[in-house]
Structure formats: structure tokens, C-alpha cells
Image (cartoon, rainbow, N blue to C red):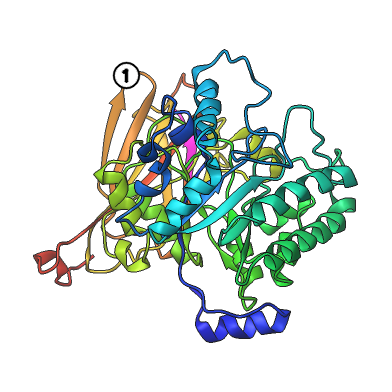
Amino acid sequence: MIGRRQFLAGAAAVGVSAAPRKRRTMYFNDARHFYLYSFDPPMSDEDSWRPVDELLGTAVNTLIYGVETGGLFSRTKVAVRAFSESRPYTSALAWRAWYNMQSLIDRGLDPLRVVIDRAHDKGLDFIVSMRMGGGPKGSNTDFSQKPTRDLRFSWLQELASYPVEGVELDFAYIPNYFPPGEARQHAATMTQYVREISAMIRAKGNGRIVGARVFPSVALNRSLGLDVDEWISKRYIDYAAPMFYGFHQLDPNLPFETLVTAARGTGAEIYPVIQPFYLRKEEHATPGMLRAAVANYWAKGADGLIVAPWFRWPLRDAEKSFLTDIGDPAAVRDRDKHYIVAHREPDAAKLGYDQPLPAVIGQAGPSARAAIPFYVSDDCASRRVRSVRLLLKVNNLVGQDSLMVRLNGSSLEAEPVRRTSHRYEFHWLDYSLTRIRPRRGENTLEVALPRRPEGLEGGITVEQVELALEYALPGSVFERPRPL
């Protein structure tokens, strides 16, 4: 979190009104899946307050509310209301969403204002988030066209008129804002547009926050015509939230460091988005996996965190405990963690946000190897770390293969390893790292296949790489120095 003096200096340099910032822990609710889709109309007061009330007692102090899906989830006067073009309905969820909003409107209420007022009553700040690439079916999303920009500007003007603490511009939802091949030539137009939106939002109220949901790196954003580093340096936005929508996969190695560098000294902040799923399956990440990702994000320079939806719902004690832990870096320090390496997502890879897994070694030979980078925020050499296990899932592996594994250039040949075979598909290699351990920060795991047994050709695939850290309990014998 930036210090008060640093923020004041940065804000003064760019002509932005200076005020001390609190560390924000934010939760994103898209108004649909765990809200308007979930209750049968008419909506009761208790149901209408659910996005706020379910967060009480946690470290979350700011609710981000996604207000656009083919229209606005509000009593809008300048746009269409969400799901207005779907009637009559063939899906229960769309029917629920429309008639839940309508039941509030029939009582003289605005569906958006209901949630805002409840947040303020319970001491939460409220940021309204609008998909910049969204809109009704058939609406133009070519931002080189003035009518496209003007239409969304009018929606944002209306949203900024609500009594909210901020407005977030969601650029991460759809990556195509300009015709193919024209992104760079229109980047200045988008920057000027963000500047105008920012000025309008801030004029609506003192201390208004302007955020932008963007892609993980400066280079990736720039390739799409989004000069986010310039938006940050000129303080058109107060925070950037790096993420990728495609698969909601937890990525402890989310490469947002270039955004942190861009924000340094400006007073702007970086809030990476925590996704809920383990690899690409519909399997939720464990608490240890989430702690590892959170610790990495703090170590990489995050100023705060945003939790995406899609966690188990209704929120149980486990989810609320996680939402409490993420409010302070100290809450995840010296606690058991389970680091994972994310899987490649084709759409993200096409944009330049690639993953090292699965790593294919196509054929055995002297140069048959794969390098897998990963980030670790813990000091694994600390005497407080009781054990470190490196787990590799390798497809098409047999016991007679000559497999070489190195960590940061050091062979793991002498480290104890337990090999388990699962049917005919893959092996798990479970290393107990006693002499060779990961370093704090960037690490590289190298897997090589110099040769295979006679009669076996083809290659192997490193499918998963995981690192499990177990900490000693305070006062235990494992806190004493021990030889490595």
C-alpha cells in the first residue's frame, strides 16, 4: 500500500485532489449469477440486500457491482434495462432477473440504488462497474466510431450520478475494441476517451475513484489499443485491476509486474483479481492454493485485492474465512501454502498471456527438455518451514525413462522422491526437498528426457507442477536450526 506522503506527492504532480487512501479489499458481484438469477420473484428485502450482507464480518470493505449485461441492472433512463430484449423468456434465470428487478421497480425502488444504499448502511464503499465492450445485441463495439463512444459515455454519466464512491471501466471483458489490425492507430483516441470519462466521473463528486479492469501486462494492453500505462501515469485512472476473464483460473504467477512499475510514484494503485478455480476444471482452489496466490500478489507489489465471483455460494465459513485473511499481507505470512502453475488457455495465449503448462517434450534426446517458470513469495530456506514438497504430474511416463529434473540449475537426483503410477496414463513424482529448495521470487524448473527404454518412442507431457509448503507450529521442535 502506498504511504500517505508518497500518495500526496504523486497526486500533486498530476493535478489530482489528494486524500489519504485506505487499503481496499474488494469483492466483485456481477448482479446475476449469485443474485438476480438465484431468487424467485418478487424479491424480498433480505434477498435484495444479499450482495452486501453476505460480506459482513469479513475484510471486504468495497463492493464492486457489475451493472451491465446487454443493458443495465437499474431503473435506467438512457439505456435499455438488462434482459429487456429477451422477452418472452425461455430460461428461468433470465425470467428471474427481469422480474426480480421489476418487483423492486413496482415498489418505487431502483434495483441499483437498493444495493448502493444497503452497502452504505453497512459501512461498505460501492464501485459500479460497466463492461465497456458490452451492450444490447447488435450494438457497435468499434471505439474508433464516435457514436459508440458517445453511447457508452451517456450510460456512464447516468451511473456516475448515483451516490457511489467510484466507477470502474471494464475493458477486460471483450478484447476487441477496434477493427483487426487497427488497435495501435486508435490508441490515442481511446486514451482521450478515458480522460474525458475520468473528468466527468470526478466532477460528479469529490474523491470519486476511477478504476479500470484490464489485461495483466502493459504490453498486452498496448497491443489491444489500451495504453493503460499512460492512463496510470497521467492519473486518468486511480487503479488498474489486471485479470483475464476466459477461464476463471487461479494463476499465482499472474504477470502484472509491469503495471506495478507503471504505477510507481504516481499514486495510482494495482488490484489484481483473484480467480477461484484450480486449473481449468470446475474444481475450486483449496485454501492453501488461494493463500499462495494472495501471498504472491502481495510480494509482486499489489496494493490490494479484488475477489472474483464463482466461489462456492452461498458463502460458507471457509469462503468467509478467506475473505477475512486477504485484508492484510501478514494474515497469509508463515502459513501453509500450495503453489500451482496455471494451464494454458488458448484465447489468452493468442493475446500473449501464455502459460508454461502443459509442457510437451515431444521426443527423447539430448535437447529434449522443458523450462517451467514459477514464483514463490515464501522464504523456503527459513527454519520455520517444516517441509517443502514438489509434485509433478507427468503423462506417458514409465519407470525406465531417463528423466532429469533440475530446480534453478540444481539437480534433484539426490532428493527423496516417491513415484506413484495412476493406471496407464500418468505418474506423480513427489519430491521431498531437503537440500535443494526454491528461492524467494522467480524460479525455473527444468525437466529433461535424454532417452527412453528400447522400443518406446514418442514423448512425455508435464501436466501439473505444484509446490506444497508446510510451516512448523510456533514453539515446535522444527523451529530449531536443522542441517540441510
Left or right of 334, for residue 130: right
Foreground: 158 or 469?
158
Residue 60 visible in this rendered orientation of the protein:
no
Q: Quick check: 99 above or below 292?
A: above
Looking at the image, residue 195 sits to the left or right of residue 427; the answer is: right
Question: Image quadrant for the C terminus?
Answer: bottom left
Quadrant position of residue 102: top right
Q: Is residue 199 left or right of residue 303?
A: right
Residue 424 x/y as whole percent: 36, 18
Residue 452 at x, y percent in the picture: 46, 29
- In magenta, the rendered stretch is 447-452
Q: Secondary structure at mark 1?
A: loop
Residue 241 among magenta residues = no
Q: Residue at x 50, y 52 (%)?
A: 116
Is any part of residue 177 visible from this angle?
A: yes
Residue at point 70% right, 83% down? 13
Q: Is residue 171 above or below residue 480?
A: above
Mark 1 sits on what residue? 423
Q: 464 or 145: nearer the eye?
A: 145
Position of 423 compared to 52: left or right? left
User: x, y (%) of residue 320?
Assistant: 30, 49
Rate crowding at label 1 as few (under 14), some (14 to 19) or many (20 or more) other CA atoms within 10 Å: few
Asked whether residue 450 is drawn in magenta, I would say yes
Q: Is most of the magenta stretch helix, strand or loop?
A: strand
Residue 471 pos. (x, y %): 22, 59
Q: Amino acid at mark 1?
A: Arg
